[in-house]
Amino acid sequence: MRNQRRSGRRPGNQDTRETILAAARTIFADRGFDKASIRAIATAAEVDPALVHHYFGTKDKLFLASMEMPLDPGELVPKALDGPREEAGERLVRLVLSVWDSPAGKPAVALLRSAMNHDWSARLLREFVVTQVLRRAISELGLTGADAPLRTALVATQIAGLAMVRYVLRVEPVASEDPETLVRAIGPNVQRYLLGEIA
């Protein structure tokens, strides 16, 4: 009996997971998190969508895996913002610093450095910061007004600026400053962008 080569989608094997991740990085960078779909990623990887769900579960989990993020903002952000609303800005800055200062933050720092030179990395980093961190913060605080996107972007200026100065450019004394000093200095700005007057 002749061996016939199967056509169609790729069967599961040890390379399938990496193939899906490579396709996911491309789709997320090209289309953004919101417009990317499991079906589109599966098509690009030449696998059945069920395999994507099998390896990664949800689109959020797939996105985090494609970013090589060991921590899930979906779990961390609600915990960080659980408390008095007037301290939300400080708690959000404290969360960012605690993650990025830890070994678990190394992939994010590496992506931030790469984003300086590569548009593809910059798009992935933007999608991560906006959809996984800032959008969750806005949702946790119950901000649904027309200015919510502006608030999100303004918070991003503080978070991205802090990350760039502390971890990439390593400008002193910010690069080696005690995290709580930075929380006290930057937290009020983030607080105003989240809940205060912005116009």
Image: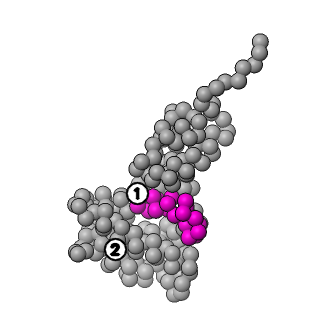
**In the image, residue 44 lies at what x, y percent?**
56, 41
Q: Is residue 161 left or right of residue 146?
A: right
Part of the protein shown in magenta: 113-131
Q: Amino acid at mark 1?
A: Thr
* N-terminal label among 1 and 2: 1
Residue 122 drawn in magenta: yes
Quadrant of the rendering where the N terminus is positioned: top right
Query: Which quadrant: the C terminus?
Result: bottom left
At a point 49% along the width and 40% down the height, the residue shown is: 40
Q: Give the overall secondary structure of the magenta segment.
A: helix
Q: Is residue 75 above or below residue 151?
A: above
Crowdedness of circle 1 by 10 Å Cα count: few (<14), some, many (20+)? some
Place of residue 66 in the rendered image (x, y in percent of width and height, measured from the top left): 55, 52
Residue 137 lies left or right of residue 114; in this view the side is: left
Residue at x 35% of width, y 59% of height: 135
Which residue is outermost to the bottom?
A: 173
Asked whether the viewer can see residue 175, the reply is: yes
x, y percent for residue 15: 67, 41
Q: Determine if the magenta segment contains residue 1.
A: no
Question: Element under label 1?
Answer: helix
Q: Is residue 56 left or right of residue 87?
A: right
Q: Quadrant of residue 143?
A: bottom left
Q: x, y (%) of residue 187?
A: 36, 76
Whether residue 93 can be seen here: no
Indicate the secondary structure of the residue bearing disc 2: helix
Marks 1 and 2, Cα distance to the nearest angstrom? 17 Å
**Residue appearing at x 53%, y 81% in the figure:** 175
Q: Which residue is mark 1?
A: 131
Residue 117 quadrant: bottom right
Name the residue beneath numbered marker 2: 190
Q: Residue, x 23% and y 61% (percent of image)?
A: 146
Q: Nearer the viewer, residue 79 or 189?
A: 189
